Amino acid sequence: MNEFEIVVETESPCHYRRALEVVSSKWTVLVFYELEEEKKRYSDLKRRVEGVTQKMLTQTLRQLERDGLVERFVYPTVPPTVEYALTELGKSLIEPMRVLHRWTDAHYDSVLEARKVFDQANG
């Protein structure tokens, strides 16, 4: 490589795959729904996202912040107050998530039935 070559680092050869990685986490979806209307403090998110551990919530919020979907606000109080909000990019994901949610509501019973039939035939 010479001094004029630019190295472009990519995490995945397929952008679609990476997008799915972002939104396929159940914690991401639950955090998104909590932040849809307004900023929330970390402690509020921890309390409202049922079943999430502190470690998992922290990892999820950091990844969402890294991906530009969530913004973190730190206020100079003692102890520091930290709030999170969806960015404009994050807000643009709400409707696609709702579409998937509607599909799930409409079709998940069919998925469960298909699994049952498959398991009985292949069990």
Image (cartoon, rainbow, N blue to C red):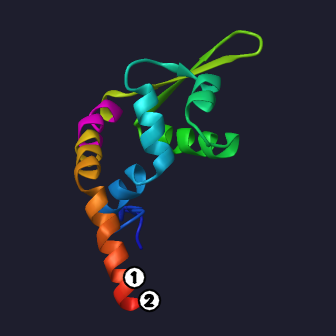
- Give whichever of 67, 110 is nearer the camera: 110
- Check disc 1 and give the amino acid type: Asp
Q: Which span is picked out in magenta?
A: 90-97
Q: Quadrant of residue 68?
A: top left
The furthest residue to the bottom: 122
Residue 103: x and y in percent read 23, 50
Left or right, 74 with reference to 95: right
Please state if 69 lies on the left or on the right of 74 as rendered.
left
Q: Secondary structure at mark 1?
A: helix
Find out whether residue 55 is within the magenta segment: no
Instruction: Identify the residue at horizontal 31%, vertical 34% (top origin).
Output: 89
x, y (%) of residue 12? 38, 66
Compared to residue 13, the image places residue 57 above or below, namely above
Q: Which residue is mark 1?
A: 119
Disc 2 versus disc 1: distance between alpha carbons? 5 Å
Residue located farthest toward the right when viewing the structure as drawn? 78
Location of residue 118 (image quadrant): bottom left
**Amino acid type of disc 2?**
Gly
Callout 2 touching callout 1 (CB < 8 Å):
yes
Q: Is residue 14 visible?
A: no
Residue 11 or residue 24, whichever sits in front: 24
Residue 59: which quarter of the image? top right
Tell whether position 91 is magenta. yes
Q: Quadrant of the N terminus?
A: bottom left
Dominant secondary structure (helix, strand or loop) of the stretch shown in magenta: helix
Mark 2, residue position:
123
**Disc 1 packing (10 Å; few <14; some 14–19; many ≥20):** few
Q: Is residue 35 above or below residue 96?
A: above
